[in-house]
């Protein structure tokens, strides 16, 4: 067998039957175990990529031994609590404590040793409000006490006087814009001249709460003249930087350690910098460890959510279905502070056309301020919002033309060599047509569409894509690092990429094991601790496998070269130690201009097509999805079970986005901040999901892999709404609750 | 107060109205039982009381007097469901896993997919979309059947 490591041999060296190489795994029904070893693959101890090795921390998780932040206690530890604003906009006029201060540590903005900001993109968000309050639940005061009961009682006695100002809740009425982006390709006017028909539409998407089952939480400890924070978080170096600025400390005096993290989905990307700051202020002042763990209600009212938005499309199309002009306006509600909004908008506008070619495009995007809690990162990061609009609009174009929705998409889907709205020329790994055709045939879409006509059943589809890694020049700016340390029996991975359920440790260890040609079991993964691991960038943007995994692959290749014919033991006896650190090195020829928004937005795109079947309850008008077919092309499934887990989980989360999860905002506050009335999909709401993973290797990804984490949440919402549309109901906004469906008009028949 | 915890008789001093969840985590030092919502909706805190799955965040400690309480630690890593959850990807972030495994352990033998769905309807998982959990339960059930046949 030829070497399956390094260079372009990686994917052609395997003597796989063709069909195996294409469709690695599938789970047609939950009654069948679909992810066993693919047949026909040579298995050796040195071969773990593409196999379902046991996940590194699996045993600890199934036995309850894995330690999450709330499972830790430290001697002398206090509990912390945050006092928040009860108004949406105004000025603080007075704070009355109303309890005996003995035994309490109390902190406000004056206790911040450094700068009172949550350092991220813009330094606009105070860690503790000073005079102004800009949203409900804005943190104002911190309390700590060793007894939780006393703490809660004290909290109930605090009162704050405000001078209220008229708040702005409607993004269309906002007078403050965080970021505006314009993407232009070709000449829009010419495109509309070529059109026979112009289709217009407005689409609305609501907030969505990440709803990781473990709420946000941290413990801060004063240690060695600095501060150490243990916490449930995705991005240790984001927290590290925020604490340095907040406390005015040098690098080495701040240490951030990730505890086992019970889900993130973006909700633990930027928010942990805030809660870590609060715990650190209390720990700094009390000189004792302070635990700050939110309960569910606090987590829901105070932390970031997916940006709601209004997206307007105006499209020129010929009678035979060719798109000639696309004009899109995207408006996102950023909430009271900037957080990551400009980057969310960026990903949103870049994905706004959907995976379709068109020579004349203009996209105008804005994210604006309102007096609501700041919105932020959530799996998909702008793309689910804009692709919802794109795919429902595409369906409406098909309805207007009286054209088969599959044929319309086939006609316009990106092919290799096509250019996107930013002018990026798509590579050979462009699989839009392939996923579409596979999903249509696998789900028997056309026959079912005919059969369901006139019944209470519907079927719809959505075609979508998702860029892997940071947008534009983001990866170059990040300059992420990863290290690999030689051990007597193998290697130890040192990265800041966090395991939040998606399988980071396992997948990285597989890449390293195969590159070093050692058994998977011999690769260890160091705990994520900023005192030990380099800054590998944040664990976001579907970059952990494709970008950080690739850096690790390069580290492993260098260790192999360095070792030569020597064993690890021999090398270590001779030299003492070997640690290789590498920095991100992008593929040659990637170009991006942040001013004009022209160039290569992403190194690679994943491609997906979802088909959803639904049933309408004739009494309640409730829509129940009965079956979802999810076909996704991800380059290479390093670990098929984990990859399928991302697809199934993201798909289910999108079922909630489409049908159930409504954040009821009343006077700028979430009125349903409980699991009792914010409904996420349970076993009874989640249909059978038939997953098919296709592989079309990306030449610069480790073993051909692209990103997989976010894409699955882009497709189900528009596919569900398109299935509802096939019942003749003109729904254009989500969540499509029974109330919205009841109010929706009927779709007029074409012509 | 006396009760049986994971097969061993225990005498534990705690306020009678303290949540069973907190007594298990604090007085008994068993942190495998997790809190997800504190209102009985998510099921992360599920434990077995006399073999029945219950939300330990809703139960005052006094209510388990004389009962048999089983937490995830009580399965000792030897239950077929635990292996199956690893193999099939039934555990991702792991926070719902202890509760999910205990709820699954209380399902009737040879449960159909519909019975599994109903039995787990009180346990929310935000990572998996449940498919991998169903596969794990099916796999564990097959393993147990095989083991019985071989005996």
Image: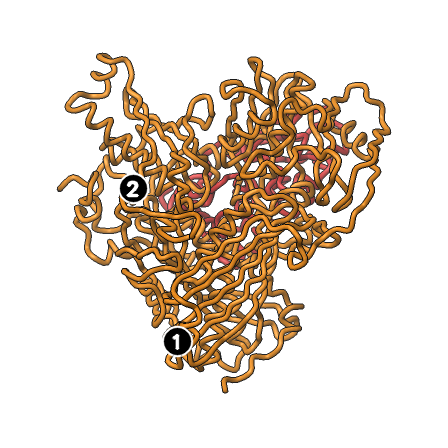
The residue located at (21%, 38%) in the rendering is A5
Describe the element under mark 1 as helix, strand or loop.
helix
Q: Position of B75 compared to A440: left or right?
A: right
Q: What is the image's colouring?
A: by chain
Task: Give the CA distance from mark 1 to mark 2.
Answer: 37 Å
Which of the 4 image quadrants contains residue B5? top right
Q: Is residue A635 above or below residue A97?
A: below
Q: Residue at the location (39% across, 76% down)? A: A446
Residue extending farthest bottom: A751
* Tint of chain B: red
Q: Mark 1: few, some, or many residues within 10 Å (few <14, many ≥20)?
A: some
Q: Chain of mark 1?
A: A
Residue at the right extreme, as displayed: A98
The local secondary structure at tag 2 comes to helix
Query: Which badge, 1 or 2, is on the more N-terminal residue?
Result: 1
- Counting from the top left corner in percent of width and height, residue A221 is at 60, 20
* Residue under pointer 1: A446
Q: Which mark is residue A702?
A: 2
As drawn, B78 above or below A631: above
- Residue A705 visible from this viewpoint: yes
The numbered disc on residue A309 is none
Residue at image coords 53%, 79%: A455
Residue A46 drawn at (x, y percent): 23, 35
Q: Is residue A472 above or below residue A102?
A: below
Q: Which chain is orange?
A: A
Q: Residue A100 appears at what percent x and percent y?
A: 85, 23
Label 2 Cα crowd, 10 Å radius (few <14 / some 14-19 / many 20+): many
| Quarter occupied by residue A220 | top right
**Disc 2 chain ID:** A
Q: Position of residue A615 (x, y in %)?
A: 54, 71
The quadrant of the image that shows the N terminus of chain A is: top left
């Amino acid at each position: 067998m030829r070497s399956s490591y390094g260079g372009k041999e990686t994917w052609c060296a395997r003597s796989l039957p063709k069909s195996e190489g294409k469709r690695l795994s599938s789970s047609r029904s939950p009654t069948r175990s679909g992810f066993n070893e693919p047949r026909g693959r040579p298995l050796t101890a040195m071969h773990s990529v593409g196999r379902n090795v046991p996940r590194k921390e699996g045993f600890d998780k199934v036995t309850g031994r894995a330690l999450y932040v709330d499972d830790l206690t430290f001697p002398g530890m206090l509990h912390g609590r945050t006092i928040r604003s009860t108004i949406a906009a105004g000025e603080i006029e007075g704070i009355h404590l109303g309890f005996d201060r003995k035994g309490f540590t109390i902190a406000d903005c004056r206790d911040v040793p450094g700068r009172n900001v949550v350092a991220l993109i813009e330094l606009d968000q105070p860690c503790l409000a000073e005079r102004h309050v800009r949203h409900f639940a804005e943190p104002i005061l911190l309390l700590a006490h060793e007894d939780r009961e006393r703490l809660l009682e004290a909290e109930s006695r605090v009162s704050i006087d405000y001078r209220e100002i008229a708040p702005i809740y409607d993004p269309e009425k906002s007078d403050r814009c965080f970021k505006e982006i314009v993407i232009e390709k070709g000449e829009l006017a010419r495109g509309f001249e070529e059109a026979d028909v112009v289709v217009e539409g407005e689409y609305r998407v609501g907030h969505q709460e990440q709803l990781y089952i473990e709420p946000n939480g941290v413990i801060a400890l004063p240690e060695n003249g600095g501060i150490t924070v243990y916490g449930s978080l995705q991005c240790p170096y984001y927290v590290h930087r925020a604490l340095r600025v907040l406390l005015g400390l040098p690098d080495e005096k701040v240490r951030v350690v990730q505890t086992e993290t019970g889900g993130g989905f973006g909700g633990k990307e930027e928010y942990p910098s805030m809660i870590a700051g609060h715990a650190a202020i209390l720990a700094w002042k009390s000189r004792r460890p302070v635990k700050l763990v939110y309960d569910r209600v606090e987590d829901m009212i105070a932390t970031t959510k997916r940006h709601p938005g209004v997206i307007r499309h105006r499209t020129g199309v010929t009678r035979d279905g060719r798109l000639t002009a696309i004009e899109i306006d995207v408006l996102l509600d950023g909430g009271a502070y900037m957080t990551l909004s400009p980057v969310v908008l960026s990903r949103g506008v870049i994905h706004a056309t959907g995976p379709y070619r068109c020579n004349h495009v203009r996209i105008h995007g804005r994210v604006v301020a309102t007096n609501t809690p700041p919105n932020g990162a959530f799996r998909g990061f702008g793309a689910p919002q804009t692709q919802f609009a794109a795919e429902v609009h595409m369906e409406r174009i098909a309805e207007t033309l009286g054209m088969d929705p599959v044929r319309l998409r086939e006609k316009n889907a990106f092919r290799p060599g096509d250019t996107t709205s930013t002018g990026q020329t798509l590579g050979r790994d462009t699989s839009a047509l392939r996923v579409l055709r596979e999903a249509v045939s696998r789900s028997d879409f056309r026959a079912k569409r005919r059969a369901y006509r006139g019944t209470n059943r519907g079927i719809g589809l959505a075609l979508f894509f998702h860029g892997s890694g940071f947008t534009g020049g983001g990866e170059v700016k990040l300059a992420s690092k990863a290290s690999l340390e030689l051990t007597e029996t193998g290697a130890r991975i040192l990265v800041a990429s966090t395991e939040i359920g998606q399988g980071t440790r396992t997948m990285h260890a597989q890449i390293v094991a195969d590159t070093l040609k050692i058994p998977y079991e011999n690769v260890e993964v160091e705990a994520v601790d900023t005192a030990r691991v380099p800054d590998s960038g944040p664990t976001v943007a579907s970059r952990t496998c494709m970008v950080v995994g690739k850096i690790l692959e390069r580290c492993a290749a260098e260790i192999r070269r360095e070792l030569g014919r020597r064993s690890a033991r021999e090398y270590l006896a001779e030299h003492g130690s070997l640690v290789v650190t590498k920095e991100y090195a992008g593929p040659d020829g990637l170009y991006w201009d942040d001013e004009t928004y022209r160039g290569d937005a992403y190194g690679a795109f994943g491609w997906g097509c979802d088909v959803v079947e639904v049933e309408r309850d004739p009494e309640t008008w409730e829509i129940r999805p009965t079956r979802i077919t999810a076909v996704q092309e991800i380059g290479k499934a390093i670990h098929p079970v984990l990859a399928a887990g991302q697809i199934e989980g993201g798909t289910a989360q999108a079922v909630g986005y489409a049908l159930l999860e409504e954040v009821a905002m009343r006077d700028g506050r979430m009125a349903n901040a409980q699991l009792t009335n914010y409904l996420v999909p349970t076993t009874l709401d989640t249909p059978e999901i038939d997953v098919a993973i296709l592989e079309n290797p990306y030449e610069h990804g480790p073993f051909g892999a692209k990103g997989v984490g976010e894409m699955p949440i882009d497709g189900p919402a528009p596919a569900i709404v398109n299935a509802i549309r096939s019942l003749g109901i003109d729904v254009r906004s989500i969540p499509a609750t029974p109330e919205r469906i009841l109010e929706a008009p009927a779709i007029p028949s074409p012509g | 107060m006396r009760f049986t915890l994971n097969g061993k008789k225990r005498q534990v001093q705690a306020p009678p109205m303290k949540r069973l969840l907190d007594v298990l985590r604090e007085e008994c030092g068993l942190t495998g039982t997790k809190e997800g919502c504190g209102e009985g909706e998510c099921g992360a805190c599920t434990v077995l009381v006399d073999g029945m799955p219950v939300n330990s965040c809703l139960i005052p400690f006094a209510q388990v007097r004389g009962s048999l309480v089983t937490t995830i630690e009580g399965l000792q890593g030897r239950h077929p469901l635990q292996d199956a959850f690893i193999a099939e990807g039934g555990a991702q972030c792991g926070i719902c896993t202890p509760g999910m495994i205990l709820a699954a352990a209380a399902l009737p033998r040879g449960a159909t997919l519909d019975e599994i769905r109903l039995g787990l309807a009180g346990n929310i998982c935000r990572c998996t979309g449940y498919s991998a959990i169903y596969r794990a339960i099916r796999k564990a059930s097959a393993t147990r059947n095989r083991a019985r046949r071989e005996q």
